[in-house]
Amino acid sequence: MQVNDAYSPQTPIEGVMHAFTRIGRRLKAKQPGDTIDHSAHVVMFALRCNGALRLSDLAGRLELDASTTSRHVRSLEQLGLVRRSPDPDDGRAFRVELTEAGIEQWEASARHRMELLSAAMEGWSEEDVQTFERLMTRFADGVAARTEAPSSAAWAEKGWAAVAPRPSARAERSTDQNSAASGDPATRENTDKNLESTK
């Protein structure tokens, strides 16, 4: 289906839905410099948050069937980004975990998307960014409270903050410049505290 960015929403709620559609399809698409696609990124995120997992447990956390999960794991294994190791609790089973290269690749991909979001908010005041973050978090909480999710998916609620990669030097310079412009040099420290509080 072709999504028309020129569409004019008729109500604020339609506007929110349309904005999410526009953002979602772009963030899921491969960006310049990406070497892994969105589905691989999600699999690696689950492993980054949870550590080594049995294939069945990984599938449960991703809410995917075992065959689809196995296909993703095989592709990542061929790229050297994940490895299988014997399950210490069951010699007949194996666990899947990120390799060092996988961790580096996931962090690079995640950092790239963080930089994209930072660039999209270039020129915003620090107050605008904080207001946006507060409202987005409130909105996410509202959606989560009204939709059912299996208990195995709870890791994703606070998983990002625990494993978020540090911004690159370029992103830090951009943040520092925005903070200086807004008169709030403590922004970076507050962000670190917020991330720490979610662990």
Image: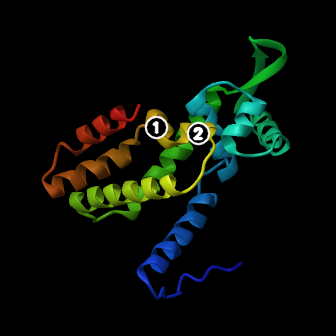
Please report whichever mark, 2 or 1, sits nearer to the chain's N-terminal start: 2
- Numbered mark located on residue 36 in the image: none
- Pointer 2 and pointer 1: residues touching (CB < 8 Å)? yes
Q: Position of residue 159 (x, y in %)?
A: 50, 37
For label 2, the residue is 106
Which quarter of the rendered picture does the N terminus lie within? bottom right
Locate residue 49: give its quadrant: top right
Side (left or right) of 83 relative to 116: right
User: Viewer-proximal residue, 7 or 139?
Assistant: 139
Q: Quadrant of residue 118?
A: bottom left
Outermost residue, left side: 183
> Compared to 80, does 1 lie above or below?
below
- In the picture, the disc for residue 165 is 1
Side of 13 relative to 170 (left or right): right
User: Which is nearer the eye, 100 or 50?
Assistant: 50
Left or right for 54, reference 21: right
Look at the numbered disc 1 and give the secondary structure of its residue.
loop
Q: CA distance from mark 2 to mark 1?
A: 9 Å
Residue at (61% x, 26% y) in the render: 51
Q: Give the colour scheme shown.
A: rainbow
Q: Residue at x 49, y 79 (%)?
A: 14
Q: Closest to the observer: 102 or 42?
A: 42
Regarding mark 2 in the picture, which secondary structure is present there? helix
> As shown in the figure, which amino acid type bears the numbered disc 2?
Trp
Picture coordinates of residue 8, whole percent (x, y)? 49, 88
Provide residue 152's location: percent of width, then percent of height: 63, 37
**From what the image shows, is residue 21 above or below residue 152?**
below
Residue type, numbered disc 1: Pro
Q: Residues within 10 Å of mark 1 (few under 14, many from 20)?
A: some
Kindly identify the residue that appears in the image at 71 percent across and 30 percent down: 82
